[in-house]
Amino acid sequence: MSYRTESTPTAFSRCTRLIVIFALAISLAACGDDNGDDNGDDNGDGNDDNGHLDASGMEIETRGPERAVIAKWNPEDGWTDSDGNSIDELPDPIDQEGAGGLEPMRVGGPNASLTLRVFDRNGDEIDMGTISRDDDTRERECTEYSARYYPVDDETDIFAWPNIQHPDSPLGQAAPYQFAETDDEEIVGIFHCDHIHFYPENEGTVDVEFMLWHVDHADDISAPLTVRVEAEE
C-alpha cells in the first residue's frame, strides 16, 4: 500500500543526521531484541509495515439532528450503507434542522459535516479528538490520529480543494493542512480531527478516499467512494 504524506521543511546538519541515524539504529535493535514477536508486530496495534496502524473498518455519520450512519467500509466488503447494501456513492449527507430528512449536496447550498470513525484490527474505535483550537483561525491540534479525505486524483473543483495551511496560522510553515479556499475566497476548515467538511462548489462527481491520518501521513486508506454535488435548486 502507498501512504500519502505531507512534507515539513526540516534542517539538520550532517553531524546531527549521523547522530540521529545512529541513535535510531540502536533503538530499533533494542526493540527487536526485547519486544518483537514472530509477526514483527511490536504491540499488537500496528501492522508489519513500519508500525503503521491498520484500519479494520470505517463509518461515516452525519452531524445534524438525524445523526445517521450513511456509509460503512471494511477491506473485505467494501462500501455499504447502514443496512449492509453495497454502495459506490456517498448517500445524501446534508443533515439540517427542519429538513425532514437527509438531502444531497447542492451548488450554493450548505456544507456537509460528517463524523468519520475508524476502527483498529481489534474492532476498537481509534481516538481522533481535538486537543486545542486557536480562537482566531480555528486551527486545531489533534490527537495522534485524525480523519481526512483526499480526491483520488488529488484535484477537483466539485468541492473546495486543495487542503491548505491557514494563511494567518501562528505556526507558520509548521501549520497543519486543515483548510481550503472556496470560490468566494473564504478560508474554511475541512479537517476537524474527528470530523470532516465538504463545501460544494460545482455540479459533478469526484472519487474520494477516506483516511486514518497519523501526524503527517496516512496510515490506512479506504477504497474510493464517489461524492456528488447536484445542481442548484
Image: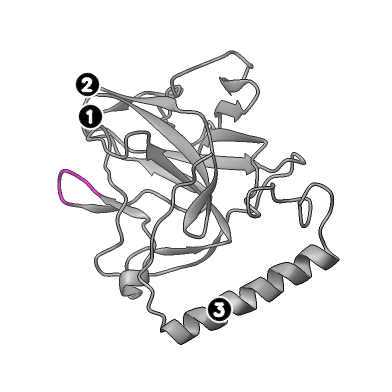
Front-lying residue, 61 or 146: 146
Q: Which of marks 2 and 1 is nearer the N terminus?
A: 1
Q: Which residue is drawn at 63% across and 73% down?
A: 24
Q: What stretch is highlighted in magenta?
A: 181-185
Instruction: Give percent across and percent down for residue 89.
Output: 43, 20
Instruction: Give percent across and percent down for residue 168.
Output: 26, 69
Look at mark 3 in the image and give the residue it sits on: 20
Q: If the image is split into quadrants, where does the C terminus sit? A: top left
Q: Which residue is drawn at 63% across and 20% down?
A: 77
Say which mark, if any, is on residue 118: none
Left/right of residue 89 with respect to residue 180 in the rendered view = right
Amino acid, disc 3: Val
| SS label for mark 3 | helix
Q: Contact (CB < 8 A) between labels 1 and 3? A: no
| SS label for mark 2 | loop
Amino acid, disc 1: Val
Q: Contact (CB < 8 A) between labels 2 and 1? A: yes
Instruction: Give percent across and percent down for residue 117.
Output: 59, 41
Colour pattern of the rendering: one colour
| SS label for mark 1 | loop
The question of residue 164 being in magenta is answered with no
Q: Which residue is drawn at 49% across and 46% down?
A: 3
C-alpha distance separating marks 1 and 3: 50 Å
Left/right of residue 198 with respect to residue 181 in the rendered view = right
Instruction: Give percent across and percent down for residue 170.
Output: 33, 75
Q: Main secondary structure of the magenta part?
A: loop
Say which mark, if any, is on residue 107: 1
Look at mark 2 in the image and give the residue it sits on: 231
